[in-house]
Amino acid sequence: MTDTVLAAPVAATPKGPRKRDFGLKRRHAAERRFRLFGLAAIAIGLGFLALLLGSVVLKGYTAFVQTSVTFPIAFDPAIIDKDNKRASDPKVLVAANYPVVARNGLAAVLGVDVKDKKAMKELGNFLSDSSRVPLRDFVTANPAVIGQTRDFTLLLSADLDSASKGQIDLGVPEAKRKVSDRQLAWLKTLRDKGMISTPFNWGLLTFGASSRPEAAGLGVALIGSFIMMVVVLVCALPLGVAASIYLEEFARKTRFTDFIEVNINNLAAVPSIVYGLLGLSVFINVLGLPRSAPIVGGLVLSLMTLPTIIIATRAALRSVPPSIRAAALGIGASRMQMVFDHVLPLATPGILTGTIIGLARALGETAPLLLIGMVAFVSDYPTNPFEPATAMPVQIYMWANEAERAFVERSSGAIIVLMIMLLLMNLVAIVLRRRFERRW
Amino acid sequence: MSLDTTVETAEPVLHPKMQGDKVSVFYSGKQALFDVSLRIGANQVTSLIGPSGCGKSTFLRSLNRMNDTIDGCRVAGKITLDDEDIYDPDIDVVELRARVGMVFQKPNPFPKSIYENVAYGPRIHGIARGRAELDEIVHSSLRRAGLWNEVKDRLAEPGTGLSGGQQQRLCIARAIATRPEVLLMDEPCSALDPIATAVIEELIDELRENFTIVIVTHSMQQAARVSQKTAFFHLGKLIEEGRTEDIFTNPRNKQTQDYITGRIG
């Protein structure tokens, strides 16, 4: 039955239905081509990212360890307190010549004659100048130690640290490098005796500014950046969210609000250095706030972050379905109840994400901070927002300008720290978004 | 051309709960509703029918001033609730919407728990004193919305997790929890399947005892099934209003007849 039915039309048109040309070949080729372009773009992007991260990490990972030497130090009263006045004058212990104490201890270990002045000078350069501080603090806290011998761990000087990390080109003639053959030999001796250690370099995260790389750290910059982030959060978030809520939920669309909207979008595109100039002339010159202070930096960054937060918040508010607003208004909620009970909770993940991305941008911002004097040599921790501080990116900028090999390593290390912080912030953004996200 | 001659009116409503008098609505200057006068009887179901864009939803939304929320919308004429002008500057729109509740076309529960959905209205209006009373309002509202048996064990679950028909009944429960006098329904069944629609229609019939209901619907069968009074809108004008059986069996106007027989719309 079926056969006969089918057979009839086939017989009538023996060639069968004419094959239509859908251009499939061309269309598939175009699709493949497009996909290839996309993959190539992503591959190039990833390649550059890997290159960047690779170079920073390779240069910087050594900054996280610092070469130290542990050796017995004899706290010789003849050097620390020659005239035996420490009972009456506490300043004696503070002003004592601790580097000599340390140097003599090291000389004893290495068998160097204390009278060999040239050797002793090289030995002095072997240890970090900053050794003075821990020794001083130790002795003033425990004066009883004078006259005794204690094992003490001190940092090597930056040059020896670099040498120990293999960063110094030993092919260069001795006279032209900062590390002498004798110092290298001492290093080897100490290493063979098991006195050299490479502990995690907490100093990178805690020390303030210093012209000696081994004693320079991000401490002040971390605190400065933290204070600025707090200032930005306190100033920009409430202001930005309030402005967005007003513009999005309360203000009627008029020419004036359009004008404001255009201006906010423009502000987001203003180069950050312009905000620095604004901060300099308004906060410092007019309002008389101190230079180099994180409060000023925070205010400048707040101005810079405000448009970002407003744009993100408005987008988040706009993405809340209008049916939710209608539902709330329909049962007699006031506009404010509608916003705060229903719209804002739904917009929260978007607002938080936008804010954190704005904060992350502010954290990495350098140019405006240069103009308000946050590029400064600050060695003491700021205790309040009005005291001088630096910021992480500025610290990187300053270290990158230094010539010494140990600073190259430190600036890369600081970049790693900064990037880890940015990654953490983005992670927080993702977690918060996941946590608050609701479907409707 | 006077209004009274164009609108065919049968059987006056004796106790109008709400009354529109020459209501015109403009969206950004464009007129969407032309001099509509309609009386809405207490404890009746009034259905507004007509083709898309005929202004029936616009009229409905002006009854609880939801049009206020649209930028550039202007309402002219007079609408009264119990002889009180609802567009009077002294009228608080929050109070009005507590008295004139609304159910929307698409079920729009809050993304909160079922309990919270229903409790929100009574809470903001301070209707309940204490937790026990609030519980009682929520339970009775869900019961009256015919949803109680399906959700009584999962009041803490999100309202958005319910099926479409359940969500719409949740929205009805939410609307009646504030004890409104009038309930406006904007095509409440258009997003629902026939079974859910039947449940809602039955519900509307039960709710008539306690509420005055105005329903916009695209389905003429639905209007015939649930309403006592029907108003036919076309191109922003009220063409004919009257008892539902009269409109469907014996329309006076040619356009009405064309619409209900399926020739226009």
Image (cartoon, rainbow, N blue to C red):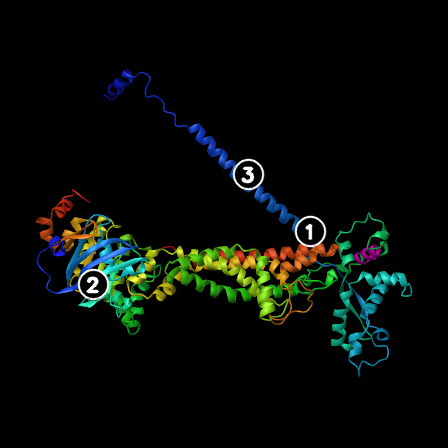
Q: Are marks 1 and 3 on the same chain?
A: yes
Q: Find the residue positioned furthest to the right.
A: A115
* Mark 1 or 3, closer to the camera: 3
Residue on which the image places disc 2: B78
Secondary element at tag 2? strand
B174 lies left or right of A154: left
Query: Mark 1, mark 2: which one is toward the viewer?
Result: 2
Please give the residue where the numbered disc 1 appears in the rendered image.
Answer: A59
Q: Nearer the viewer, mark 3 or mark 2?
A: 2
The tag on residue A40 is 3
Where is residue A191, by image quadrant?
A: bottom right
User: Where the N terminus of chain A falls, by quadrant?
Assistant: top left
Q: What is the magenta range? A: A183-191
Seen from the viewer's position, the closer of residues A350 and B23 is: B23
Residue B231 location (% of width, % of height) = 15, 54
Dot 3 crowding, Cα within 10 Å, few <14, some 14–19, many 20+: few
User: Along the line of sight, which residue is nearer the eye, A5 or A178?
Assistant: A178
Name the N-terminal-most of marks 1 and 3: 3
Residue at x 45% of width, y 31% of height: A28
Q: Residue at x 69, y 60 (%)?
A: A201
Quadrant showing the C terminus of chain A = bottom left
Q: Main secondary structure of the magenta part?
A: helix
Q: Secondary structure at mark 1?
A: helix
Residue reaching furthest to the bottom: A88
